[in-house]
Amino acid sequence: MQEATSRLGRMALGIGAYRDHAYRRDLPDPPVIWAEGTTRLLDYGGEARGKAVLLAPSLVNRHYVLDLAPGQSLVRYLAAQGLRPLLLDWAAPGPEELHFDLTAYVARLGRALAAARAAQDGAPAALLGYCMGGNLALAAALRHADDVSGLALLATPWDFHAGGAHQAALVQQLAPQLAPPEPEAGAQPEPMAVDMLQAFFWALDPLTVLRKFTGFTRTDPESEAAQRFVAMEDWLNDGIPLANGVARECLEGWYGANSPARGEWRVGGEVMQPARWRKPALVVLPERDKLVPKPSAEALFHALPGAWRHDAPSGHIGMVVGPRAESGLWQPLAEWLRDWA
């Protein structure tokens, strides 16, 4: 009991140090070249007009994890390499999006791809999906292949029951129980609250909070490491509610029934089969991913014919914003996009 109290005390000190830290994100948004509902397409290309790369993040977290802070921005790095990053900001669901399911979001991504192609004088864009955004990107690429030149999927889950036996069992039991009830006819659907989503992901690795905030007590608050930590935590705590239909489809279908790996995930009535993708594809697998176990994303690599594979030496989030992100992901990703996508 004394040891447990001591550890919890150190964690509380770390949480206090995080909350009191002076860092606040102040990066300005680039121009918006297309919008629909609450969704925006942000153009990071500046005056350069290289190959367009449309980046689709997850629906449950803010887009700016890909533009987190100076020195922690994948999109600004890609722009500096001569590419034209177009970052999709899904934002929180508004009155229209509250009625969305995954098919509706994939259709919207398809229209964003058309806007990207129009901005490139008719040239198809490379499409990059991160985490859940990778599932949406794959579906959009299969349904709008003419608008996509190549497909990059970062830490994208496919076999939702793969990984450690304990975690797989937890996912199968817990996820369907958290799914919000289907709304009554004519009623406004209630989204799945951010706190419920956070609780689900916390349950997959319940000691993370203890470890990271205890470690933060030993970090110099003036250091770059402290700023990186605060920037990442601010983003993690700035989540987005999930539309009712999307939450039920993901929790019951993806996590509960494992519909993608079983060949049963349908978008617009059509089964999503990765084997149908015949253009260039890259699958990025983080080595230490607690949210998407490596075997889950690896299943998608094996399902995509002729896909390239890159193993990033980091975790799910550290892969894109951590201290080794540039060498571990950004540089090889930029080279692949330039040469193959």
Image (cartoon, helix red, strand yellow):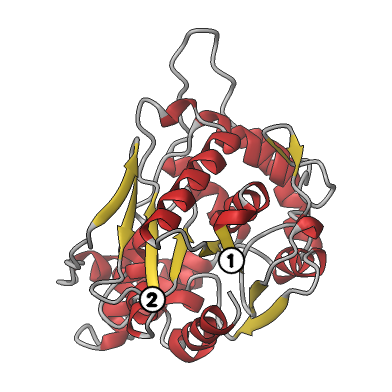
Q: Quadrant of residue 117?
A: bottom left
* Residue 8 can be seen, yes or no: yes
Percent position of residue 309, x then y: 70, 80
Q: Secondary structure at mark 2?
A: loop
Q: Alpha-carbon distance for marks 1 and 2? A: 14 Å
User: How many other residues sit within 10 Å of disc 2, few (<14), some (14-19) or many (≥20)?
Assistant: some
- In the displayed structure, does residue 93 sit left or right of residue 246? left
* Residue 1 can be seen, yes or no: no
Name the residue furthest front. 121
Decide: is 200 above or below 206. above
Name the residue furthest right. 262
Say which amino acid is labelled 2. Answer: Gly
Percent position of residue 294, x then y: 70, 71
- Residue that mark 1 sits on: 149
- Quarter of the C terminus within the rendering: bottom right
Percent position of residue 260, x then y: 76, 48
- Residue that mark 2 sits on: 50
Residue depicted at x 62% and y 33%: 248
Percent position of residue 40, x then y: 33, 48
- In the displayed structure, does residue 88 sit left or right of residue 186? left
